[in-house]
Image (spheres, grey):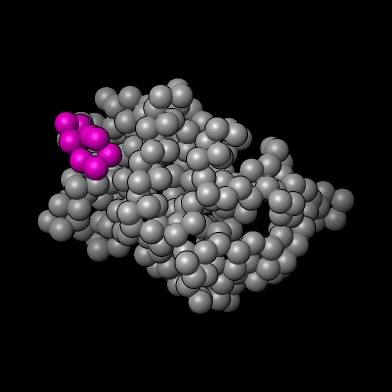
Amino acid sequence: MSALLDVRDLVKTFGIGEAETRVLRGLTLHLERGEMAALLGPSGSGKSTLLTILGTLMKPTSGQYRMLERDLIAADDRALTEFRNAHIGFVFQFHNLLPDFTALENVIFPTAVREGRETPQARTRGRALLTRMGLADRIDFPATKLSGGQKQRVAVARALMNSPELVLADEPTGNLDRVSAMQVMDLIAQINREEGTTFLISTHDEKIAALCQRQIVVGDGVVTG
């Protein structure tokens, strides 16, 4: 494996003056290509803030962030949007599917945004991803007619649509029953093994964390283990 990203001395402060809250306090983290890592820590430890910064959705107050040898602190908003669409996928606790779209339309949405339209190639890849997720019979179902576990598998497929090097997952099994959670994690592990996609998975579930190759513990705004 080789380096995918490095963050050094990340600080993130919200508010000013007496209302100032420092969420990240000089956090340093290194991820290798192909890792499947769990991000652990109590509520308020800074995990979600870290994921938001790693996803280029928010800039830190200070510190360094390099991914794929790009300086993402110095990049402007347009460059960050292009980088994010090409190289980073997201899976959220609340799947955030578009309710009026079918499973396939949700999956190909990131590519449609990038290309400005739906393409036959995107539809072919979207169908292949949904089939891999065990949803071949749900491809044209509206998102509203899918179960919770099915919606989250659609969300995983959507995160993989543009073949990102990194997928950030924020409590991806938090709203699922144990069987559905294990199905989602099995799919993530399979993608990690077969395609070398790097996953960073925030979770409070020790059983989910145990399925990952590495556990990264965050406490009081820094990596503690």
Please state which of residues 76 and 30 is positioned toward the viewer in this rendering: 30
For the point 56% across and 40% down, which residue is it?
209
Q: Which residues are magenta?
A: 131-139
Query: From where the camera sits, is residue 61 visible?
Result: no
Residue 212 drawn at (x, y percent): 52, 45
Please state which of residues 178 and 115 is positioned toward the viewer in this rendering: 178
Q: Is residue 138 magenta?
A: yes
For the point 57% across and 50% down, which residue is it?
214
Placement of 87 over or under 75, stated as above or below: above
Query: From where the camera sits, is residue 68 visible?
Result: yes
Please state which of residues 34 and 78 is positioned toward the viewer in this rendering: 34
Total marks placed:
0
Placement of 101 over or under 192, stated as above or below: above
Residue 115 falls in image quadrant = bottom left
Please state which of residues 170 and 52 is positioned toward the viewer in this rendering: 170
Q: Is residue 114 magenta?
A: no
Placement of 111 over or under 179, stated as above or below: below
Residue at the far right: name it: 18
117 sits left or right of 224 in the view: left
Residue 77 drawn at (x, y percent): 50, 68
Residue 183 drawn at (x, y percent): 37, 32
For the point 64% across and 43% down, which residue is it?
40
Residue at the far left: name it: 120
